[in-house]
Amino acid sequence: MVRHILSIALVLGLASAIQAQTPRDVKVTRVTGRWVKVQGTDQFYIQTADNKEVPFYTGTTTRYVIDRRPVQIADFKAGNEVTVVYVNEGERSVVRQVYSGPDPDEKPATFYEGKVMKVVGQDRVVLRTADDKEVTVYVQPKTEYTFNDKPGSFADLLPGATVHVDYDLREQKPIARSVRSIRERR
């Protein structure tokens, strides 16, 4: 019995020691810049907006993506606009993913077109689409508005206007990236 209790205590002690060594909150950082060069087999540099050349280290799980397609590190060319997603491991910035073009983890944009039925509060607009569906779209402070080819605002959304809304689906809600007026199709 004592031996059994000691075995359990030893296992629990090892489990907590392993858990203590495992980082719980890994900070993932994202930076954009221009591709500069590859150095060796596990390092590349980008030039950030403040003209600093920053080194990054690759790992066995690093993903390379151009225009949502998997590629090899050699497919990146000097001057390509890139986004690097990395974690700091000691003194090294270890890359999880580097991509050029749209974020490969974002779903492609979707849209609605229809008549504004009503505006609800300061963050929602209800549309009736061409197939007679009523949909609610949520807006955010960074939503861009264009009416008659001129910049606008949420206050310019009026019932009866025909609009095109580009949105992303977040937490099962359509969140507008942009709203623009369109001419009604006849």
Image: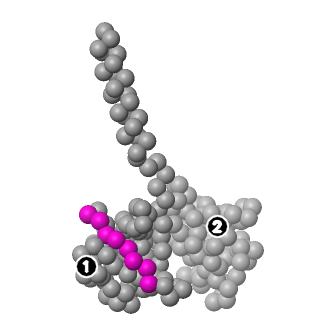
Relative to residue 8, is residue 148 depicted above or below?
Answer: below
Residue 56 position in % (x across, y down): 38, 74
Give the colouring mode of the picture: one colour
Instruction: Give the numbered dot on residue 139.
Output: 2
* Residue placed most toward the observer, 175 or 81: 81
Say whether disc 1 or disc 2 marks the residue closer to the N-terminus. Answer: 1
Residue 95 position in % (x across, y down): 37, 68
Residue at figure coordinates x 34%, y 71% from the top left: 57
Check disc 2 and give the amino acid type.
Val
Instruction: Give the numbered dot on residue 90.
Output: none
Left or right of 8? Residue 50 is right
Left or right of 67? Residue 25 is right
SS at circle 2: loop
Query: Can residue 66 be found in the magenta stretch?
Result: no
Residue 47 position in % (x across, y down): 44, 85
Residue at figure coordinates x 43%, y 79% from the top left: 54
Residue 138 position in % (x across, y down): 62, 63
Q: Quadrant of residue 119?
A: bottom right
Check disc 1 and give the amino acid type.
Gly
Q: Residues within 10 Å of mark 2 (few under 14, many from 20)?
A: many
Residue at the top extreme of this rendering: 1
Q: Name the image quarter holding the N terminus.
A: top left
For disc 1, the marked residue is 40
- Magenta residues, dominant SS class: strand
Q: Quadrant of residue 177?
A: bottom right
Alpha-carbon distance for marks 1 and 2? 46 Å
Which portion, as a residue range, is magenta? 53-60
Left or right of 66? Residue 140 is right
Relative to residue 95, is residue 81 depicted above or below?
Answer: below
Residue at figure coordinates x 28%, y 73% from the top left: 42
